[in-house]
Image: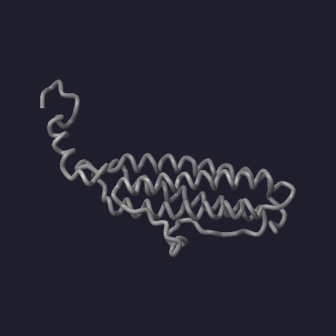
Amino acid sequence: MSDNQPFLTDIKTLRERARQHIDDGAVTAGYDADRDKVIQLLNDALATEIVCVLRYRRHYFMAKGPNSKGVADEFMAHSNEEQGHADQIAERIVQLGGEPDFAPQGLATRSHAEYVEGTTLADMIKENLVAERIAIDTYREIVQFIGDKDPTSRRLMESILAVEEEHADEMLDLLAANPDAEKAH
């Protein structure tokens, strides 16, 4: 490699490597992570997002009471954002050569968060806050596990983590504004 070559690996070598194992798509020889483990972690995160979508949607439809309209709208907005996260994670799993696990059977056991219905608006807000806190901790651990070995998956999980932190703050604000919310149904 010459001194004026800006790459760590010379272009000829990079070109040769790109033609090898072409069926691996985005996963090149430079991929250092345990791909099977990353796919498993991403599938667990996918299950978590799907459970959150479903819980937020139920809460949207079940929210009742004088202050429920704004809270319900927030639930639906979060549900839609969680669905976007699920789609991003599924896309990354495919890029890594895996298969996203959308199977309903076992979804609750693969998810980090629980599906808790809640009976009052305050209960619903609390359950969503708990689920966001679980996602924050587990996604932070996924980011730390991946480290520098898979920067694309790490950045994806970091961006989702940031949104989950926003969701937790929003749920905390809603809880403060609705501490004694009436029965949901």
**Quarter of the view holding residue 16:** top left
Q: Is 9 on the left-hand or right-hand side of 99?
A: left
Quadrant for the N terminus, please. top left
9, above or below 53, in the image? above
Q: Residue drawn 60% across and 57% down? A: 132
- Determine the residue located farthest toward the right in the rendered image: 66
Q: Residue drawn 25% across and 54% down? A: 23
Q: Is 60 on the left-hand or right-hand side of 134?
A: right
Q: Residue drawn 46% across and 55% down? A: 89
- Determine the residue located farthest toward the left in the rendered image: 1
- At which x and y percent is residue 75? 69, 55
- At which x and y percent is residue 105? 51, 75
Q: How is the image coloured?
A: one colour
Quadrant for the C terminus, please. bottom right
- At which x and y percent is residue 3? 15, 26
- Determine the residue located farthest toward the top in the rendered image: 4
Q: Is 7 on the left-hand or right-hand side of 152?
A: left
Q: Residue drawn 43% across and 46% down? A: 155
Q: How many marks?
A: 0
- At which x and y percent is residue 14? 19, 40
14, above or below 141, in the image? above
91, above or below 104, in the image? above
Question: Looking at this view, is 113 or 91 the one in front?
Answer: 91
Question: Looking at this view, is 12 or 160 the one in front?
Answer: 12
